[in-house]
Image: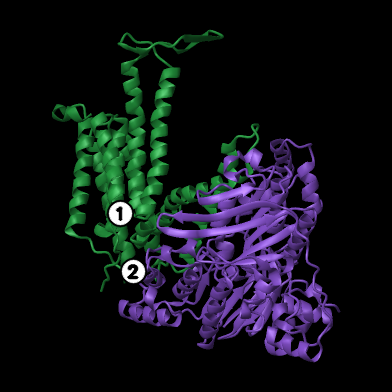
Amino acid sequence: MSVLVGRDKASALTATTWWLLGVALALSASLSHNALLLGSVSFVSLALIAVFADRERGRTTIRIYGTMAILVIVLRIVFRIVFNSPTLDPVAFNLPTLSAQVGQLRFSYLGPVSWINLGRAFIDGLHLAAIILAVAMANAVANPRKLLRAAPTALYEFATAAAVALNLAPQLVTSLFRVRRARALRGASSGLSGFGGVVVPVIEDAINKSLELAASMDARGFGRTGRQKPGALAASRAAIALALLLMATATYLLLAGHSEVWLPVTLVAIALGAVSASMRLANLHQVRTRLVIQRRTAMDILIRLVALALLILVAAAQLPSDAALRWLS
Amino acid sequence: MISLRDVTFTFSGAESPTLGRVNLDFTSGEFALIAGPTGSGKSTLLKLMIGLAPHFTGGSVAGSIQIDGHEYSGLQPHDFASRVGYVNQQPEGSFVSDTVFEELAFGMEQLGIEPETMRARIDYVAETLNLTHLLQSSLDSLSGGEQQRVAIGAAIAGGQQILLLDEPTSALDTVSATTLLAVLRRLSSQGITVIMAEHRIERLLGSVDSLTVVHGDGTVSKVKAIDGYDQLLRNNRMVPPVVELGQKLGWTPLPLTISQAAEKWRSEPAECAARGGVEPGDTVLSAVDVSVNYGEVKAVSSASLSMRSGSISALVGPNGSGKSSLLWALAGELKHAGSVSFGDGVEPASLKPSQRLARLAMVPQNASDLLMLSSVGAELAESDAFAEMATGTTGQIFASLSGRIDPKRHPRDLSSGQQLSLVIAMQLAKGAGILLLDEPTRGLDYVAKHRLAEQLLSLRDDGKAILIASHDIEFLALVADSCSLISHGALAPFGPANDVLSTLAEHAPQIWQVTHRVATVAEVLA
């Protein structure tokens, strides 16, 4: 039995698919320093928000995360201009060089700014901006709470922690708006950093709200384990913990680029095995039932495969041996 | 049904227990009210009955909690979930889904109920709570009262026989609250034990089966309606207006409802001295044809009003009627059509906050949003510095509003009433003659409300022009000189407060409904 729900455009795909896509885009951006790829990730994310997100939610997301993305790029460029390293490349514009001597160390700031340095700074900024926008896309299109509903029982503890954390970001945004609006009524003296004053109530508020959500879910039975043998429960949790550890190690190895390819790949394979074993164990004593199911469609599978392919392609392009894909990195 | 035996609960780091050796029994189908001052431990008592205390609040618990004779002490909230449903103060914050249907199903899915049964239960619950037409609606699109009913439905859909509600009516306007109350009554008559904690009890006292008072010193007393609440309420200050009237006139037994009081009043009427009208001063703020739109939604349509010094006016209306939007527009912080100007023609929106605060101050719904420093003393000093006033200016206003408070205390540790006084003092430091208050009594108990009323009246006597947006009729009856009803963004003309409030029929101030001459207990002579 299932009921198809949701009349919004975003329900063309399941929440899980949206988040897998978001994570794949973010990971691809984090692996690459290619301007074309980073630009595409940013553009695709924004386009998906514009098309699929609920209007109000989309507008808020673009305003907040878009500002954040632009800020990151601008900051990178400003830092590069201030903490300039002199080059022989064509100079874009000249600024006076300031130097300071601290003990034996000599620091110099500003000076002639080259096009190459500006370009690098821009790509550095774009690198982070693309990651921010990819996550913003998933957040805007598929409420993280939906993801939580779909989480398998075996992942309960991690899912709750993740839900609280994921819910924190949008909650922060909501609280930020409210507090900033209220703050405008009071004003602040020049001696007081407006930033610090806003941050405390906003974070307090957002954390409280997130915990409230977790408490309410627990009170409604989320996390019941049923008549599971304590041994099986412990084994299933241990397997999940192991899988997470392996995944983290594999990611590190891959990003650090210190190892051969086979090692992270093997680790990921073992991790996937551990996850499926854990789910098998937990599902032996399934206590939950489902009434509201959004079925995976062929489109879901397709998008997930495309996301995976993109990730593999970008990851492969990072490997020094693979010259054929050099153009990507 | 559910019993507490010698239950003691202590927050970690607290010197004395919030609840000490509490013994309580709630029977099947009981409609129970837990009352007491804010911060006395009402919510904690509810949370103990579903395991949220101590599992989500921290702290330590002793004693035993039993449901139908089964021991539940020490269990997690999800172990209680099949027997107990819980609805917290802000239900919208606890929603997990997008639509009403999904939300009602969520709890049952966790409990492992068969899909066929779930479907039937959802139909049944939707029918009982009058949600059938909303099943496919998005949760965001619902009104506060509807959200509250969805949360209740979700809490009992799995066949839970105990329903706990934390302040279910305090954020609701009168009409939604009345509807909700009828629904809860129906549930209890179907055998569900309904236990609610609430500090706004004027609408509840007459219809509940029992009253449990959490005194705030760790003790708790419970009395059944048939045994009478007289002993519990006789010298209690935390009581609604009709009970206060009974206390003042020495009536025995104390009236709990308007009809009881009205009957007694007919046989023993007392003298009344209506409050003298005030002579308002000059017009200090006027708004002409103010409209506020959010996209296609009209929040306020062509509202016109004027505020005069030395008077308190009130905007009365249900949730979502446009009260807040109008206030924000008047404060110059919300884009609007039409004009808002001070007596000399200057527009609030054209001024910087520092200049504006010399003329107009606003306190928003969440007053604590304005508090940002780590001690009361620092807040006061910052306020003086920003207002460019002599050191101690804000402190003086604050002291006159709420008495001396240790300046080393953290603002977030103050009670809601004290926080509100602090924010009012800060906002008035620069000598603003106009004060706008949005829903100021949210979270205040009866004593705190009386204190706030005194503060506002003394500010009025100092010549301030005050505008309050609220749906708390009893509070407005205490302070307002003139009132206007607002609904769907349209403002009715202002009139004398008693005339306007008395047109609200069954929602008029309790004392008005009893005496038909005055609206507050103070105006009735003992």
Check the residue under mark 2 and report the chain it is in. Answer: A
- Mark 2 secondary-structure assignment: loop
Numbered tag placed on residue A286 in the rendering:
2
Q: Nearer the viewer, residue B482 or A167?
A: B482
In the rendered image, the residue lying farthest to the right is B526
- In this image, B220 relative to B462: left or right? left
Residue A77 in percent (x, y) is at 39, 24
The residue that disc 1 covers is A275
Task: Say which chain is green.
Answer: A
Residue at point 63%, 53% (across, down): B286
Question: Label 1 neighbourhood size at 10 Å, few (<14), some (14-19), many (20+)?
Answer: many
Q: Out of B74 and A113, give the one closest to the viewer.
A: A113
Is B141 displayed left or right of B244 in the figure? left
Left or right, B91 with reference to B63 = left
CA–CA distance between discs 1 and 2? 16 Å
Type of amino acid under label 1: Val
Secondary element under disc 1, as helix, strand or loop, is helix
Q: Quadrant of the C terminus of chain B?
A: bottom right
Q: Label 2: few (<14), some or many (≥20) within 10 Å? A: some
**Three-letter code for the amino acid on which mark 2 is drawn:** Gln
Q: In the picture, one chain is purple; tell me its letter.
A: B
Nearest the viewer among B358 and B8 is B358
Question: Are the residues tagged 1 and 2 within 8 Å (C-beta)?
Answer: no
Can you see residue A38? yes
Task: In the rendered view, tell whether residue A282 sits above or below residue B196.
Answer: above
Residue B224 visible in the current orientation = no
**Which residue lies at the image location 37% right of the left edge and 80% below the top edge?**
B123
Q: Pinpoint the chain carrying mark 1.
A: A
Q: Is residue B213 above or below residue B335?
A: below
